[in-house]
Every structure is written in structure tokens, then in C-alpha cells.
Image (spheres, helix red, strand yellow):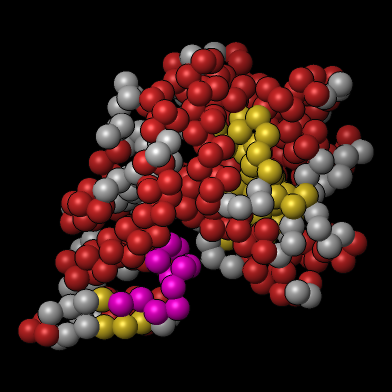
Amino acid sequence: MDIEGKIDLVSRPPIEEVVTVQDMRRLLETDSHPHHYIGLEISGLLHLGSLILTGFKINDFINAGIKCKIFLADWHSYINNKFGSDWDKIKSASKYYEEAFRFFCPGVNVVTGSELYAKSDNYWENLVRFSKRITLSRNTRCLTILGRNEKDHLHFAQYLYPPMQAVDIETLGSSIVHAGMDQRKVHMLAREVFPKMGWKVPVAVHHHLLPGLSEPVNSMLDMKSTTDSVISSKMSKSKPWTCIFIHDSENEIHDKMKKAWCPEGQIENNPVLEIAKYISFHETKEFEVDRPSKFGGPLSFIDYRQLEDIFREKKLHPADLKLAVANSVNQIIQPIRKHFESRTSLLKVYESEEGFS
């Protein structure tokens, strides 16, 4: 695969931006197998956004010949109160995350924060040096990467989170940093500060945030869509009724999809259409709607835009769209759901957690 082919592959949906494409091209001209990293907090059960959409993009990087690494951020999870900062639960859940991503993204490398820091001779020194390059106010503006904001009551350790995440990039030796759009601020901070440290500036690649199944925040508030409203509306295990987990049964998927917000003819911020676009069409060359003949008969689409146009024109009912998307999603997650049927011990840590089923 030539360089332009690699750029096309790593830039395709669900990617929203590459900072910058020119930097990516220069990197691939000098290194045909650069190092990629994506960091993940260890928290709830994995779902369409956290595993499937993220995993699709990781597989694109792997197929482009890029060396991919998943960083399971156990110390960051502890700092951000995941599992009530119960270290044993965090470590148990990390084994579940590792198993899921190794299955879904064959060839990916997985490392935990505790492993990385134990092996690094200068991580904490670099953290202090990096922190001296930024102001408290600049650091505070990055707190949205934790799902927090400046008005929240935070403990001091949470202010360490952004500089830790930035220094992780240097410690891992990553040329490409990859995350959802909600992590953009810390990547821009790294690109700003790294040259002052004499460190290699990474290319930042940000993917779309898959929304939950409920009405989006900006729609309910009748406000212009912003990055903050998109983050607030993203699919989250903290709102299990709006979330399709990788362990959901076929019936559970259909039940959730039936209740999904999907007004007839509504294109903007429609979660069912977004799942079709970023999940269903990523894995198929033909998307089929098995519609009864009395309502017009079956439909077949080879391009998402065709589906969107038909729905906008109200020539496809929401119920038929939901059924087709639910069928597609079930087919995609069925292999990993089956994979975990014989690995239930990895899920025991979640039995007392809200949203476990």
C-alpha cells in the first residue's frame, strides 16, 4: 500500500480530523511502520462506541502497516474514581478490556499504565518537567478529557491527569496519538508543549463520538451543536438504557433500538442513522432493509448517503430503519458476545455494577 492509500485508510470514517494530514504524510515518508497509541480508562462494560467503533479504527491503522498499542490507563482510572478507585477491581476489569481488544483487534499490543511506569526510569521526572511548561489555568481547560469541568468539585490528583496523559505519549514513543474527539484538548496541549521539551510532536487523529440512543442534549436544549453537547450525548455505560453493550442479546438490542430517538425524516443528530453510518456501513458493502411488501418492499443500499436521502424524504419509516440497524448490529457483535460466553469469569467484577446484565 502506498502512502496516499495509507492516509486514506487511516483518515476514513469514523475519523473526524487528522492534525495534520501533512504531518502524517511526512511521518509515513520517513517511517513505513510508525507507532500508534490509544489510551483507555478502565471502567464499565464495553459497548458499540468504546469497542466496536474504536476497534474498527484500530484495525484500519493495523491494515495500513502501523504498529498499534492500546494503553489501559489503570492509574488514570484510579485518579478519576472508576470503580470507586478500588485498585483490585480496576486491575480485574483491565483483564476483560485486554481480552476484548485482543479478540477484536488481532495484532494489537496492550500495555497498562502500571507496567509502563514501573519500567520507565524517567516518567515522573518528565511529568514534573512537562508540568512546569503549562499554567494551572491551561491545565484546567483540559479537564473535560476526564468527563469533568472547571466547576466540578475535584481532588488534586485529578489535576495531574492531563499532564500524565501527555507524558504517556512520549514514554510510549508514539508518533500517532488516537482518541475520540473528547480527548482533543490534551493532544493539542502535547503538540504545543512537546517542541519546547525537545520531544517529537505526534500526529493527532480523532474519531467520531457515537451518540447514545436517547434524544441528544443539544436537541433538548434547542441549542447549536457544539463539541461539549456532542460529548454530553455520547454513548456511555453510565447511561445503560441508551447504550448497546457487546454482551447484549439479540432481543436486548432490538428492545433498545425500538426505544431509540429517531423522528421521521430527522437527519441531524439521529443516533440510529449514526450507528448505521459508522457501524453498519463500515462492515458491509450492502445494507439491507427487510421491509414488508405492503410498505414498499425490501430496500438495499450500497452507500450511506442513499439511506440518508431516503430517510430524509420520509420514504423509510423509523421502525423499518431501526429493525435493519438492530439486525446489522447484532451480526457485528455476535462473535465477540459468543467469545465471552466461555469467559464469564472476566465479567465477575461487573456483577455489582449498575448496568450489568
Residue 229 drawn at (x, y percent): 41, 46
Position above or below: 271 against 116 = below
In the displayed structure, does residue 186 sit left or right of residue 230? right
Which quadrant of the figure contains the N terminus? Answer: bottom right
Give the total of numbered labels.
0
Q: Which corner quadrant of the image does residue 271 belong to?
A: bottom left
Position above or below: 39 against 151 = below
Which quadrant of the figure contains the C terminus? Answer: top left
In the displayed structure, does residue 16 sit left or right of residue 340? right
Closer-to-camera residue (186/46): 46
Q: Which residue is the extreme one toward the left?
A: 294
Residue at x 71% of width, y 68% of height: 7
Residue at x 66% of width, y 39% of height: 110
Q: Which residues are magenta?
A: 278-288
Q: Which corner quadrant of the image does residue 330 belong to?
A: bottom left
Residue at x 61% of width, y 16% of height: 157
Residue 53 is one of the magenta-drawn residues: no
Res. 182 in view: no
Residue 318 drawn at (x, y percent): 20, 68
Closer-to-camera residue (320/337): 337
Residue 204 drawn at (x, y percent): 70, 51
Residue 209 drawn at (x, y percent): 47, 51
In the displayed structure, does residue 271 sit left or right of residue 345? left
Q: Which corner quadrant of the image does residue 312 belong to?
A: bottom left
Residue at x 33% of width, y 65% of height: 328
In the displayed structure, does residue 352 sit left or right of residue 103? left
Res. 116 in view: yes
